[in-house]
Image (spheres, grey):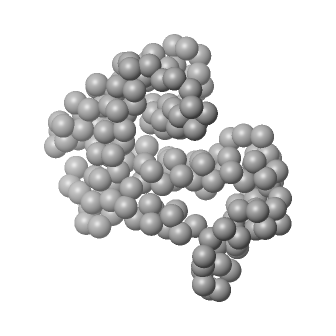
Amino acid sequence: MIIADKLSKTNRAEFILYLWQVEDLLRAFQLDFERVKSEYLVRFDLDETKRSETEKWYENLCTMLREEGLQQGGHLQIHKNILADLEDFHLRLLASQKFPYYREMYHRVLSYIVEVRAKGENANATELETCFNTLYGLLLLKLQKKDISTETQQAASHISNMLGTLSDYYLKDKAEPIEF
């Protein structure tokens, strides 16, 4: 929760990836909040107020994952809504003539999106969701200490740069609306 709060204000792209990690972490504990509390949250040195807030956040996420039938995979609707909000902003940037640098980054990434979709990996996902799925999949491969090709690392770098720029524009817009 503490990291999520910070990322929600500093980097929307990392925020989304972090939320997906938390969903998978909770699934690793079979959405059993008592296990999450006793085996995971106990590791954090938090004052009583922060501990209580953090526990409540994780408990609510466990409950929502169960209620939405996401025990095996998928993302919570609230997390999908965060991505949809970012997706809407992404499309507004692309439609505007005032952001040629962002459009250029997007066109550099588009070939990777097409390639991932051609492999049959979630063809119904939006372009932005495909970017997030790609980065999240690479994160999981790294955690498993699997080899990642130079080409894939290069694609991830371009995707990360675009998502970082999107996040920067998004946060600037929230602080003071950008004129499209």
- Look at 36% across and 42% down and name the residue there: 163
Height in image: 55 above or below 151? below
Q: In this view, does 25 lie to the left or right of 121?
A: right
User: In which quadrant of the rendered view does residue 155 lie?
Assistant: top left
Q: How many marks?
A: 0
Q: Return the residue nearer the eye: 76 or 36.
A: 36
Q: Which residue: 17% across, 36% down?
A: 100
> Which residue is depicted at the point 83% across and 66% down?
34
Q: Extreme top residue here?
A: 118
Q: Is residue 106 left or right of residue 51?
A: left
- Can the viewer see residue 156? yes
In front here: 56 or 138? Answer: 138
Can you say whether 4 is above or below 47 in the image?
A: above
The front one of 16 and 82 is 16
Q: Is residue 75 left or right of residue 145?
A: right
Q: What residue is shown at x 37% (from left), y 48% (from top)?
A: 89
In this rendering, the answer to whether 16 lies above or below 153 is: below
The spot of residue 40 in percent (x, y) is 71, 62
Specify the quadrant that holds the N terminus. Answer: bottom right
Query: Which of these two is toward me, 87 or 179?
Result: 87
Position in image of residue 149 (x %, y %): 44, 19
**Residue 117 image offset from top left, x and y in percent:** 51, 19
Observer able to see residue 53: no
* Location of residue 92 in the rendering, given as x and y in whole percent from the top left corner: 32, 44
- In this view, the residue farthest toward the bottom is 48
